[in-house]
């Protein structure tokens, strides 16, 4: 967004000109942001860290990260005219520990951030209001971002003093723990920068040790190709066998490294109604989700970030959870998906059956269904699942 309307202020020019930083902070808090900070257009080591990340192949299928790498290096590579960044955060703290769902394998675990309305829509509405006010009162240009452009959000948030990037690479706040949505306004208005956030992780490594797929090669480094959030959301193909059991009942994203952070003792339940969970996403039953066709999927996840995943990948994830459930009654649901139009779904239906059925029962189901299969990946699942 680039905006430069005529300056029309409801406050006195003296107030606006006297301390624009304090004024902007007040306006942001009044609009419902929970954290506000200010940074200059520098971005520290973020550009070099991104280069190393891509060179190591940690970005996996996310080719857009490499394609936009040059613009991600620093704010001025994205917009040369920027003088200051207003970084904001919105608290999405959950009402209960999300890890409790892992004790209920018949239920699917949806990441906390995706249980309510799409946060992009919620933040963008507030950001647009704040950006417009800044442009009008200080006759400057502005651009706003909510995880939709090549912006290094977490390093910028740390530079602006909202917190620090923890060993799990996510932002940690002294006031909100690991539960902040981030957004930014780039502006040509010159504003004093806040002090950058200081790393307060100390010797703690809970986030590293809890990861079910060992996705952290070292503290402050994430190999996305091993991360459950990447595998269940970003990865478009078949999920490798080595990760399926570890995924457990996580059907969209993973909160483990966030949820165990000790700084969450200062976190608060989100006060924002739009971000509170939809009732059907608090403790969803796998048997309900595995049956979704495309139309039903779109209805159930209208307004949710999950909708962007698409039905086929979502049901792929659900079938992995079905296979990990140890509930043989769900084999009927998995078998019903063997004729699904999507090979992603059929392949994981085969895998789920191989986990739930005895060797004899699996061989019987294979005899009924495998002969008509033409997709090589699904055929491979049938072959691997055969009794040894």
Image (spheres, helix red, strand yellow):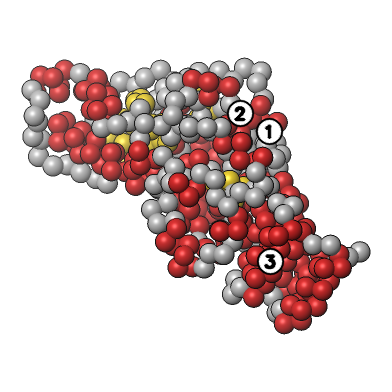
Which residue lies under the disc numbered 3?
332
- Above or below: residue 365 compared with residue 147: below
Instruction: Determine if residue 365 is in view.
Output: yes
Q: Nearer the viewer, mark 2 or mark 3?
A: 3
> Which element carries disc 3, helix, strand or loop?
helix
| Picture quarter with the C terminus | bottom right
Residue shown at 61% from the left, 73% from the top: 340
Q: Residues within 10 Å of mark 3 (few under 14, many from 20)?
A: few
Residue 260 got which mark? Answer: 2
> Which element carries disc 1, helix, strand or loop?
helix
Question: Whole-percent x and y of residue 334?
Answer: 67, 65
- Above or below: residue 170 compared with residue 355: above
Q: Are marks 1 and 2 in contact (CB under 8 Å)?
A: yes
Which residue lies under the disc numbered 1?
210
Instruction: Determine if residue 53 is in view.
Output: no
Q: Residues within 10 Å of mark 2 (few under 14, many from 20)?
A: many
């Amino acid at each position: 967004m680039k905006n430069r309307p005529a300056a029309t202020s409801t406050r006195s020019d003296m107030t606006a000109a006297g301390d624009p930083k304090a004024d902007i902070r007040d306006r942001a808090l009044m609009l419902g942001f929970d954290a506000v900070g200010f940074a200059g257009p520098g971005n520290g080591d973020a550009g070099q860290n991104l280069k190393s990340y891509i060179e190591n192949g940690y970005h996996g299928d996310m080719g857009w990260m490499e394609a936009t790498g040059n613009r991600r290096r620093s704010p001025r590579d994205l917009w040369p005219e920027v003088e200051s960044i207003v970084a904001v955060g919105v608290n999405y703290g959950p009402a209960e520990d999300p890890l409790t769902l892992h004790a209920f394998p018949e239920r699917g675990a949806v990441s906390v951030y995706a249980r309510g309305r799409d946060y992009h829509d919620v933040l963008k509405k507030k950001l647009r209001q704040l950006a417009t006010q800044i442009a009008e009162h200080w006759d400057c240009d502005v651009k706003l971002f909510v995880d939709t452009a090549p912006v290094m959000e977490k390093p910028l948030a740390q530079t602006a003093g909202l917190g620090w990037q923890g060993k799990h690479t996510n932002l940690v706040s002294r006031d909100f723990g690991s539960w902040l949505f981030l957004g930014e306004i780039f502006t040509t208005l010159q504003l004093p920068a806040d002090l950058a956030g200081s790393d307060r992780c100390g010797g703690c490594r809970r986030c590293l040790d809890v990861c079910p797929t060992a996705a952290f090669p070292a503290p402050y480094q994430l190999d996305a190709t091993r991360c459950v959030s990447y595998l269940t959301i970003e990865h478009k193909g078949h999920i490798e066998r080595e990760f399926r059991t570890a995924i457990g009942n996580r059907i969209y994203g993973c909160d483990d490294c966030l949820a165990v952070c000790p700084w969450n003792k200062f976190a608060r339940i989100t006060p924002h109604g739009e971000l509170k969970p939809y009732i059907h996403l608090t403790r969803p039953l796998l048997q309900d989700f595995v049956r979704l066709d495309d139309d039903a999927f779109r209805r159930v996840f209208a307004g949710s970030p999950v909708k962007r995943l698409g039905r086929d990948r979502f049901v792929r994830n659900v079938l992995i959870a079905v296979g990990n459930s140890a509930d043989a009654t769900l084999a009927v649901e998995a078998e019903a998906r063997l004729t699904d139009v999507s090979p992603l779904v059929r392949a994981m239906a085969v895998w789920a059956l191989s986990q739930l059925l005895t060797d004899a029962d699996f061989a019987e189901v294979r005899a009924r269904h495998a002969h008509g299969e033409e997709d090589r990946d699904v055929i491979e699942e049938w072959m691997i699942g055969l009794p040894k």
